[in-house]
Amino acid sequence: QVQLVQSGAEVKKPGSSVKVSCKASGGTFSSYAISWVRQAPGQGLEWMGGIIPIFGTANYAQKFQGRVTITADESTSTAYMELSSLRSEDTAVYYCASGQVLEGWGQGTLVTVSS
Amino acid sequence: EIVLTQSPATLSLSPGERATLSCRASQSVSSYLAWYQQKPGQAPRLLIYDASNRATGIPARFSGSGSGTDFTLTISSLEPEDFAVYYCQQRSNWPRFTFGPGTKVDIK
């Protein structure tokens, strides 16, 4: 099973962007789907989008279309999620997860958006 | 977009009791339905995939059933560590996913 380690917590100003990384080990990175899921404080899970590194094309939830970019670097087995035009409602824990069923999860990255 | 509805929102039970959680899809998802458990401060953990298959290391007291639009997660006898929030998730239009809003199982 692939292990996922995410980058550390971020504090951002409204209107700025954040880029969260997710480094994979223990599996064949290129062939795994990597999804990004976020969870606002006290709320449920929300799928944002995903990518299969070997194909390189990302898919996004309609809600985030145009504001999120998901990429993958096969050379470092790392996936990235960049969210732009941040607002306070984007304050959440952001998780990466692997597989067609989400069997492996990163530890989560808290992104706080505050002026 | 496929919408998942979970019921009840909260389930109050005692250790040793049986828990039955429901997930309903707005359209058929075939058997492409998974269940996750999440405890406070932790990432979700996959319990059941494709409606009825237990993930690696998941105890036999967890079972899933259903197909099409109606699914059930059953915990046969609640252990203290089972009190948590449970989410269903569909992947019938993979690589797009949706999650249900969750059911909280708390101690009565």
Image: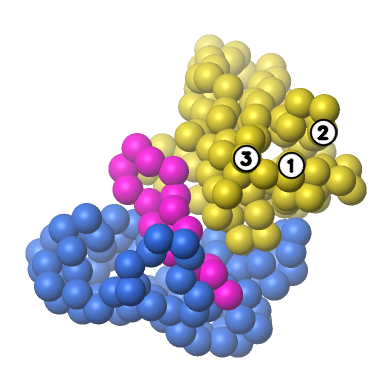
Chain colours: A yellow, B blue
Q: Which residues are magenta?
A: B34-50
Q: Residues within 10 Å of mark 2 (few under 14, many from 20)?
A: some
Apparent side of residue B27 relative to residue A107 in the rendered image (left or right): right
Callout 3: SS: loop
Whole-number angstrom distance, CA of label 2 to CA of label 3: 14 Å
Whole-number angstrom distance, CA of label 2 to CA of label 1: 7 Å
Name the amino acid, label 2: Glu
Q: Residues within 10 Å of mark 3 (few under 14, many from 20)?
A: few
Apparent side of residue A5 relative to residue B85 in the rendered image (left or right): right
Q: Which residue is mark 1?
A: A29
Q: Is residue B37 magenta?
A: yes
Callout 1: SS: helix
Chain for disc number 3: A
Name the amino acid, label 1: Phe
Name the amino acid, label 3: Gly
Q: Which residue is mark 2?
A: A74
The answer to which of A56 and B25 lies nearer the viewer is A56
Tags 3 and 1 touching, CB below 8 Å = no
Residue beneath the point at 64% across and 31% down = A22
Q: Image quadrant for the C terminus of chain B?
A: bottom left
Query: Where residue A44 sits: x, y (%)?
Result: 45, 51
Query: Where residue A90 sits: x, y (%)?
Result: 57, 32
